[in-house]
Image (spheres, rainbow, N blue to C red):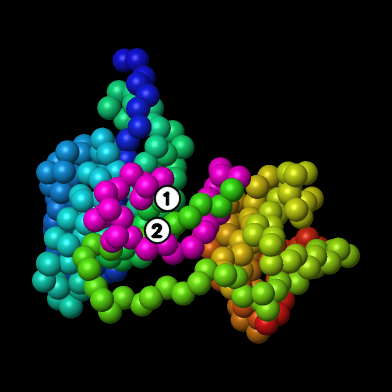
Amino acid sequence: MASQDSNQAVLFADVSGSTRLYEVLGDSRALQCVGLCLDIIRSATVEHGGRVVKAIGDELMCVFPSATAAARAASDMQNRVEMQDPVEGQQLAIRVGMHYGPVIEKEKDVFGDCVNVAARMASMAKAGQIITTQDLVEGLPQELRAMTRSLDTFSVKGKQEEMIVFELLAQRNEDLTTLVSRTVQADVRIRLRHNERELNPGADKKVIKFGRDPASDVQIADRKASREHARIERRRDKYVLVDFSSNGTFLTFRGQPEICLRREEVVLHGTGAFCFGHGYMDDPTEVVTFEIVT
């Protein structure tokens, strides 16, 4: 079947805390709860003119012909899940991520950058949240646009420029915290040291890349490191270490045990160090130390 290009809204929705449900409720009861949430997502998708593309574990990927349809479906499915009674003290919850843009349809599946961005939005969402992009928000009517609030700018893998990320509120709540100015606090800095090289990036440096790729800000010679291994992203007044590697990034905060990040991220604080593809005790030569200065 020939592929077809079109602009659509892509939505990912998954059951938040499903691992916890299986631990607390047991396999049979947890499976029922997860199935209930997925049925709600499917129903809301169809009722708002969308289509479920596929299931990926406890996550569904859906497409909609318009940003408005996706937003109404996302709000509807969130509200329906929140209305469910807790199960043995466990509140059911889902998280949703959306983006609007060009997709390639082939054999009932969809592909393209829009899909990747929507998946990234879903990974940012917390339980009960709907996270989306400026591209989708700009396609909403005023009454729905009024239900959104800008959260921040984030680096998205594959994108050269940061994207403005929004939250779509499933219902009006006057008690929601008013978000203040997004201006980065200029008094927060990070100091880095790699071998004999010191880096003191300014507040305008949003991303610091680490890896074997010569284009990296800090090139790593160790063959256990990936070409695009990790990065430090400045998000408002915080520095976040994000791992993209195959072998993991091994991080130690001073005085604490070493942890391994695998396609995960953590907010840096205080002082510490991280290695690429192996622990510090395995090879202490290729190490980056950091200090957060306030």
**Residue 206 in magenta?**
no
Image spot of residue 35 (x, y percent): 16, 54
Residue closer to the observer: 164 or 189? 164
Give the numbered dot on residue 134: 1
**Which part of the image, by quadrant, shows the N terminus?**
top left
Give the answer, above or below, for where 113 lies relative to 238: above
The number of numbered badges drawn on the structure is 2
Amino acid residing under circle 1: Gln
Image spot of residue 70 (x, y percent): 25, 46
Q: At 33% across and 44% down in the image, what residue appears?
A: 139
Q: CA distance from mark 1 to mark 2?
A: 7 Å
Left or right: where does residue 248 sit relative to residue 46? right
Q: Which residues are magenta?
A: 134-160
Q: Are marks 1 and 2 in contact (CB under 8 Å)?
A: yes
Give the numbered dot on residue 166: 2
Q: At 46% across and 37% down in the image, what residue appears?
A: 113
Q: Secondary structure at mark 1?
A: helix
Give the answer, above or below, for where 49 lies relative to 152: above
Q: At 20% across and 50% down in the image, what residue appears?
A: 73
Image spot of residue 104 (x, y percent): 38, 27
Q: Quadrant of residue 202?
A: bottom right
**Residue 153 in magenta?**
yes
